[in-house]
Image (tube, grey):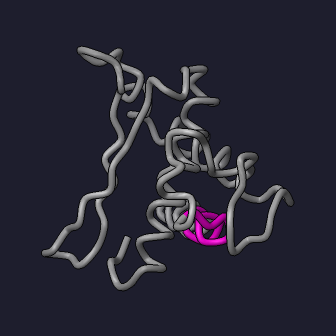
Amino acid sequence: MKKKDNSEYSQALSFLYAFLESISNALDVERNDLDGILEVNLDKNSYDILIFDNVPGGAGHIKRLMSKEAIMKCLRGALKKVSQNCCDEDTSCYNCLRNYYNQTKHSYLKRGLAKEIINKIIETIEIGVNE
């Protein structure tokens, strides 16, 4: 994701939390057993997203995302999560992106930004499949 301004950070962070929630649901894994971080990629002026098992020694949950089918299932689940009419798209709530553990970032989490980037990612993957 391109790093440009605060809205780009909000979009990357909102995507991260939507995707983590969806991975948890799709893989039937406790949400606290997964986590992720954003890293600034200065070479590409963007954010890299790193998702990892949040248990000592790792449980191997993230390895289950090695197939395109698993990624697409999680992306579609994330899209469904942020497409519900639970709050204004310029914010977020505990039904879509917010949780106790990300409370310091609540002001950055925006449901509409997550929905926008998830749609773009899905479209890009689907176009790539058809070529």
Q: Position of residue 55 (x, y in %)?
A: 34, 19
Looking at the image, is 120 positioned above or below residue 59? Answer: below
Residue 89 found in image quarter: bottom right
- Judging depth in this view, the residue of 119 and 89 nearest the camera is 89
Position of 6 with respect to 87 (left or right) is left
Tell me which residue sits at (58%, 41%) in the image: 74
Magenta region, main secondary structure: helix
Membership of 82 in magenta stretch: no
The percent coordinates of residue 36 (x first, y second) are 37, 43
- Total marks placed: 0
Q: Residue at x 86, y 60 (%)?
A: 85
The residue at the point 64 percent across, 49 percent down is 78
**Quarter of the view holding residue 79:** bottom right
**Where the N terminus falls, by quadrant?**
bottom left
Front-lying residue, 37 or 60: 37
Residue occupying the point 13% across, 75% down: 43
Judged left or right of residue 111, residue 124 is left
Q: Which residues are magenta?
A: 109-118
Please, which residue is most extreme toward the left here? 43
Return the residue nearer the eye: 77 or 110: 110
Above or below — where is 45 with respect to 17? below
Q: Residue furthest right?
A: 85
Q: Can you give x and y, in whole percent of width and height, for residue 7 in the image?
A: 48, 79
